[in-house]
Amino acid sequence: MFSAECDEVVERIAKAGGTPLVVTKNCRVLGVVYLKDIIKSGVKEKFADLRKMGIKTIMVTGDNPLTAAAIAAEAGVDDFLAEATPEGKLAKIREFQREGHLVAMTGDGTNDAPALAQADVAVAMNTGTQAAKEAGNMVDLDSSPTKLIDIVRIGKQLLMTRGSLTTFSVANDVAKYFAIIPALFSPIYPGLGALNILGLASPLSAVLSAIIYNALVIVALIPAALKGVKYREVPSGQLLTHNLLVWGLGGIVAPFVFIKLIDMLLALCGIM
């Protein structure tokens, strides 16, 4: 049993976010060593970035609850799991997955391997054990836990780019056919002439205008497909609204404007 004074020192160190190490000799307490994990600069801000992305951060540690709570508050994580065992880590991940969440984990120890294997996205530290590296989906050569931010950002940018281009393409195709079909079939069905709101010169010029426009718009979209749309940390609902207003509306307006301009150019060139 430790003295009340020793217990007080141990508790004070734990509450301050340190790990107390009691040094004894022949059952006599010589002192308490204060071990402290150094929180890297900028980590709290990066966890805040993850929070903006809609990602909840959970610190998993083998420290006691008092130390874990202090470190979690200092680092700015949303929650923590103290005195974690390999079984506890695995159970926590499975619990989140049963609730329908996508779980990403970073780790470096052999005791992290089962949880890394269970996680949907697992990033092992390059300085970690071989077991952790084999269990992870990828290895972070910089051994930085916050590298997950870059992974999420790149993944979301790819999804945003695909969503934006798909929205534009669907809207573009619908508008394009609505623009040329009335002019194309009005000689057969004169009633469709009322829908030829662009006043395209002839069925031939309508088809040629659509073909030329289609070739030009594919080339115009190549830079956006290669570079990707600009990543923005916004909720999915706001992102959908942005896609519909910018890419969707743009996909509807562009065919009407450019097909008409091409048709006028063809008419000037005598192609009817």
Image (cartoon, rainbow, N blue to C red):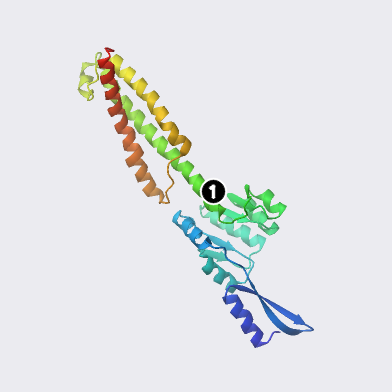
Residue lying farthest right? 26
Q: Position of residue 38 (x, y in %)?
A: 60, 67
Would residue 103 be seen by someone viewing this image from the given angle? Answer: no
Depicted 124 relative to depicted 7: above or below: above
Q: Position of residue 23 (x, y in %)?
A: 73, 79
Q: Quadrant of the N terminus?
A: bottom right
Q: Residue at x 71, y 52 (%)?
A: 131
Relative to 67, is 238 on the left or the right? left
Residue 86 seen anywhere in this rendered image of the structure: yes
The kind of secondary structure element at disc 1 is: helix
Q: Is residue 248 above or below residue 21?
A: above
Residue at (35% x, 24% y) in the render: 213
Q: Residues within 10 Å of mark 1 (few under 14, many from 20)?
A: few
| Residue under pointer 1 | 151
Residue 211: x and y in percent read 36, 20
Quadrant where the C terminus is found in the figure: top left
Q: Amino acid at mark 1?
A: Ile
